[in-house]
Amino acid sequence: MAVGYDKPLYLLPFDHRHSYGAEVFGFKEPMTPEQIAQVGASKQVIYEGFKKSIESGVPKEKAGILVDEEFGAAILRDAARQGFIAAMSVEKSGQNEFDFEYADQFAAHLDEFKPTFAKVLVRYNPEGDSVLNQRQTARLNKLGDNCRRSGRYFMFELLVPPEPGQLDKVGGDKQTYDSDIRPGLMVEAIRQLQDAGVEPDVWKIEGLDRADDCVKVAEVARRDGRSQVGCIVLGRGEEESKVVRWLQTAATIPAFTGFAIGRSTFLEPILQLRNGKLSAMAASSDIARRFKKWVDVFEQARASTAC
């Protein structure tokens, strides 16, 4: 059974790897050493933005980063020294099927960096390929067992990509799939994974527009004695108005303890840095401002719900 992590958790994720190099810099794999250094330097700017947000009033005990070892090893080490909450991604980047970045050595890498959370991103549709889902579940149980043995928290980012037949039901409209079909599939996916022994401490959930859908996700995440399990909402790189709506919706549900909003926080400042329109210092300050805004939106919505 999951131990759970139900404390407030405001994450700045920048563990994007291949997609980050391509989206921000237009780099193709394999990257040259110079390109790798450029990506790593830009992630350092994001980290500086996170630290500035703490200086500007974001509570250190509630805020954290999510970063990868490939480009963020130095950041993970510094976060440990500074006492920051840190999550480290363990999945291979850009794959439809979850597998470990470092194969059977994943545990040694976690032991080296000692993050607060081991985080995994998994694409899992409960009506999809059952054999693929079983393979993924077996690997997830290995990670969960390791987290329980090591006393490390387990964070699960659940993505539910549509199956062709599911899209056909809504005429190929992905927005309608997101609003009308995906929420129910997320609930069923969580149930299936739990029944197969996968027990995260925190579920990282794609944004939901309706509070009743958030309630259903929270109920299944905390069913059958899992009362300490937390949920956080992710931003999907969406525009500000949609992110704000998702935060305000999630904040009304006690099981939703915070958020993980990455690209909506850092992408525009980093692109402006790349284009020479912002200095590194100005870009990190803009990232800090954006991140603090999400914290303020969530906490204000939470406070108004409690009244």
Image (cartoon, helix red, strand yellow):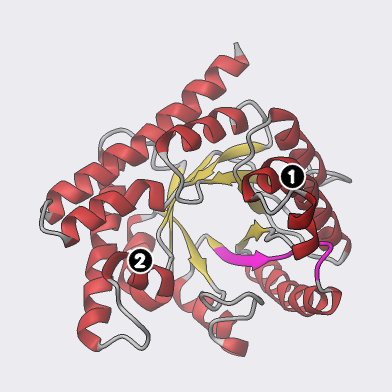
Q: Quadrant of the C terminus?
A: top right
Residue 17 is at least partly visible in this image: no
Asked if residue 124 lies in the magenta stretch, the reply is yes
Residue 4 is at least partly visible in this image: yes
- Rendering coords of residue 5 (x, y %): 64, 48
Q: Measuring 48% from the left and 37% from the top, which residue is drawn there?
A: 243
Write down the region rendered in magenta. Answer: 118-128
Helix, strand or loop under label 1: helix
Determine which quarter of the picture holds residue 54. top left
Please say if 93 is above or below 44.
below
Asked if residue 72 lies in the magenta stretch, the reply is no
Q: Which residue is mark 1?
A: 183
Image position of 10 (left or right of 194)? left
Q: Which residue is mark 2?
A: 23
- Rendering coords of residue 18 (x, y %): 42, 75
Helix, strand or loop under label 2: helix
Q: Which mark is residue 249?
A: none
Please say if 63 is above or below 87.
above
Please say if 81 is above or below 217.
below
Q: Measuring 45% from the left and 28% from the top, which residue is drawn there?
A: 297
- Rendering coords of residue 53 (x, y %): 29, 41
- Rendering coords of residue 183 (x, y %): 74, 44
Q: Nearer the viewer, residue 178 or 156?
A: 178
In the rendered structure, which amino acid carries the disc numbered 2? Glu
Image position of 234 (left or right of 293)? right
